[in-house]
Amino acid sequence: MLTDENRRGQRESGVAYDDELATRLRDLVSVKAGLTEKKMFGGLAMLLNGNLAVGVHRDALLVRVDPEQHGALLPEPAVRPFDMTGRPMTGWLLVDASGPGAARELARWVDRGLTYAATRPPK
């Protein structure tokens, strides 16, 4: 469970990411056991038992998915590969979390990331 101290530390860190999206994400995951919040990739990451599940990178939702499903998920609306180095990372997607139906889509993608992270061995 995320603590107020953990949240406060993230807000004070000066990390460049969409704070409104981070708040929406925290609201969706705050009661999940085994979840921690951490600065990663210049943004905010939510880790389940030490495995990245979802996060906020700039103004998009970062979602970790099964690498075997990566290609099948790319054509979905508002989805693009996560690419920080010129080489997209298989199993990592960015999702635009604004626009019509964004709350429902955000919840669906967060669930997808948490579900995949739960399959990974704890770190």
Image: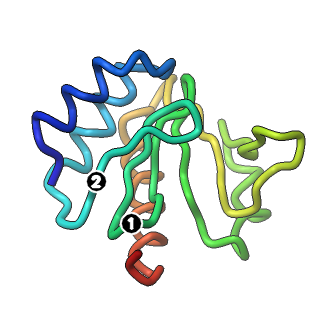
- Nearer the N terminus, badge 2 or badge 1? 2
**Relative depth, front residue between 58 and 37:** 37
Left or right: 48 in relation to 32 = right
Q: Which residue is mark 2?
A: 36
Tell me the amino acid under the disc marked 1.
Answer: Gly
Crowding at dot 2, Cα within 10 Å, few <14 / some 14-19 / many 20+, comes out as many
Quadrant in the picture for residue 48: bottom left
Question: Residue 35's spot in the image, x, y percent?
Answer: 26, 59
Left or right: 77 in relation to 2 = right
Q: Which residue does the image show at 41% across and 16% down from the upper left?
A: 14
> In terms of secondary structure, where does tag 1 sit?
loop
Q: Which residue does the image show at 56% across and 24% down from the upper left?
A: 58
Q: Which residue does the image show at 43% across and 38% down from the upper left?
A: 39
Question: Residue 25's spot in the image, x, y percent?
Answer: 33, 38
Tell me the amino acid under the disc marked 2.
Answer: Thr
**Relative depth, front residue between 37 and 21:** 37
Is 63 rendered above or below residue 58?
Answer: below
